[in-house]
Image (cartoon, rainbow, N blue to C red):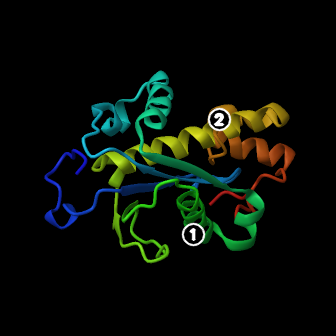
Amino acid sequence: MMRLHKPPPSEYKDYHHIAGCDHAGTGAIAGPIVGAAVILPNAFYHEALYNNKRRTTALPIHLYSMIQQHAISWSIAMVDHEEINRNGVPNSAQLAIHNALDQLKTLPNLLLVAGRSFDRYKAIPHQCIPQGDKIYAAIAAANILAKMYRDRYMEKLDKDFPAYGWKKNKGYATPAHKQIIKQFGTTLYHRKSFDGKEK
């Protein structure tokens, strides 16, 4: 079992290909939702995976590459703004993780999923773990891959829509982002669930 900040549950001892799953972008008002799944070697451990509050700008970039190099299998999948507009944020978040699991080269026999709910994937057992990225290395790794991939995607979009500050705010509803929407309106990448009004 991968090393944890607390003793591993005994019921996990017979699972050798445990996939950590997480997504990024559900709280944004523009851009995609990105899901990731990561299967790490049982002995893998890196303290920085758990230091979410203390990560520097450079550290996640280093971890992004390190995770890909050391993982038994990893995958990233994106659900775009059009899919989000059709099916809503919760369904799109589930789809992003399911699509990432579809792309794994090694079939997991247990899924550890960040959050409180998850739609069953095939016949693979799963457990939902609130703030799981602070507990399990594989979930922390999936969190980093999803977040970094989405951040880079938003930085690319920023080149075409520089007024909205996506390079900095990554599509989240910062005061500056909302003020720009008041001035210029929304783009095709903004979600229809966001009406541009102050809540």
Amino acid at dot 2: Arg
Q: Which mark is residue 16?
A: none
Left of 104 or right of it: where is 1? left
- Please name the residue shown 43% across and 72% down the image: 117
Provide residue 69's location: percent of width, then percent of height.
46, 33
Q: Position of residue 17 (x, y in %)?
A: 35, 56
Whether the residues at callouts 2 and 1 have beta carbons within 8 Å, the answer is: no
Q: Nearer the viewer, residue 182 or 5?
A: 5
Assess disc 2: are there few (<14), some (14-19) or many (≥20) residues with their C-alpha within 10 Å of its C-alpha.
few
Q: Secondary structure at mark 2?
A: helix
In three-dimensional space, the C-alpha distance between marks 2 and 1, rounded to whole angstroms, equals 22 Å
Tag 1: residue type? Pro
Residue tagged by mark 2? 152
The nearer-to-camera label among 2 and 1 is 2
Q: Quick one: quadrant of the C terminus?
A: bottom right
Q: Is residue 147 left or right of residue 155?
A: left
Q: Which residue, as the protein is rendered here, is positioned at the far top?
A: 58
On screen, 49 above or below 99? above
Position of residue 169 relative to residue 190, above or below, is above
Q: Is residue 166 left or right of residue 56?
A: right
Asked which secondary structure carries label 1, the reply is helix
- In percent of the image, x 27 and y 62: which residue is there? 15
Nearest the camera: 40 or 196? 40
In this rendering, the answer to whether 57 lies above or below 143 is: above
Q: How many marks?
A: 2
Decide which of tag 2 and tag 1 comes sooner along the chain: 1
Q: Is residue 76 left or right of residue 49?
A: right
Residue ID for mark 1: 90
Q: Position of residue 154 (x, y in %)?
A: 69, 39
Q: Residue at x 56, y 57 (%)?
A: 100
Residue ID at (43%, 77%): 123
Question: Crowding at label 1, few (<14), some or many (≥20) Cα neighbours within 10 Å?
Answer: few
